[in-house]
Image (tube, helix red, strand yellow):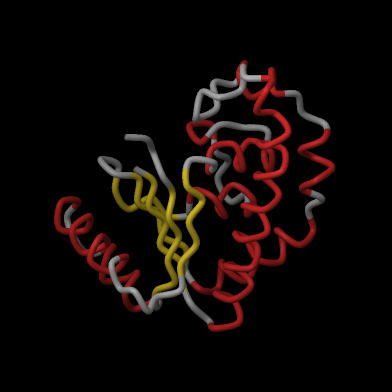
Amino acid sequence: MGMYAGYYQISDTELEHLRQLEERALVKQAETLTENETAEACDLDKMWDALHFVLTGDTLSDAADHDPLSEAVCGSDFLARQLHVGGIPAKRVKKIAQALHEVDFVARLAALQMSDFAAADIYPAIWDRPEEEDDIRAELPAYFADLQAFYDNAAEQGNAVLVMIG
């Protein structure tokens, strides 16, 4: 089993409610929110760390505070650590959506070698497989486009975002 990332649109009220809970209750409530099949969601599968690295040049553990590109992947408010749960208030979602449109993801990806991902210990550990490089280079922009569209929709709807990585 690997570490997967999911992004879910919730209301600012739901986000504030989560902030008030102790960690175990928060994780349980967050999991309940993510099971809502009508909620807008984005699944980055196992490529969340790679997207973060392309966008920021950093790993999740080195995530910069108040960097909208980093927050797009890991959230702006860390709510729980046992399972990475992050929240992003609606007003911040708009800034993140804008920042995602200002980045040239394809150019950033082209500037990186697979060895850069391996040297940074980016999850998942697939960067030493030259036979998969073309597939990886095709997948990452598609995941980025999904994330960008998700944030555009969340911003248009005035929604907050719940980030779950685990």
**Residue ID at (66%, 44%):** 140
State the count of labels.
Answer: 0
Considering only vertical position in the picture, is 109 above or below 10?
above
Work out which residue is located at the far front of the displayed protein and give it. Answer: 131
At which x and y percent is residue 66?
Answer: 58, 51
Locate the C terminus by quadrant.
top left
Q: Compared with residue 91, is residue 1 higher up or lower down, i.e. above or below?
A: above
Q: Residue at x 58, y 40 (%)?
A: 64
Kindly identify the residue that appears in the image at 30 percent across and 42 percent down.
81
What residue do we see at 45% from left, 60% from top? 7
Image quadrant of residue 154?
Answer: bottom right
Residue 100, position in %: x, y? 70, 58
Where in the figure is residue 45, as x and y percent of width and height? Answer: 47, 47
* Relative depth, front residue between 166 and 76: 166
Left or right: 160 in relation to 106? left
Q: Position of residue 92 (x, y in %)?
A: 56, 67
- Quadrant containing the N terminus is top left
Comparing 89 with 128, the one in front is: 128
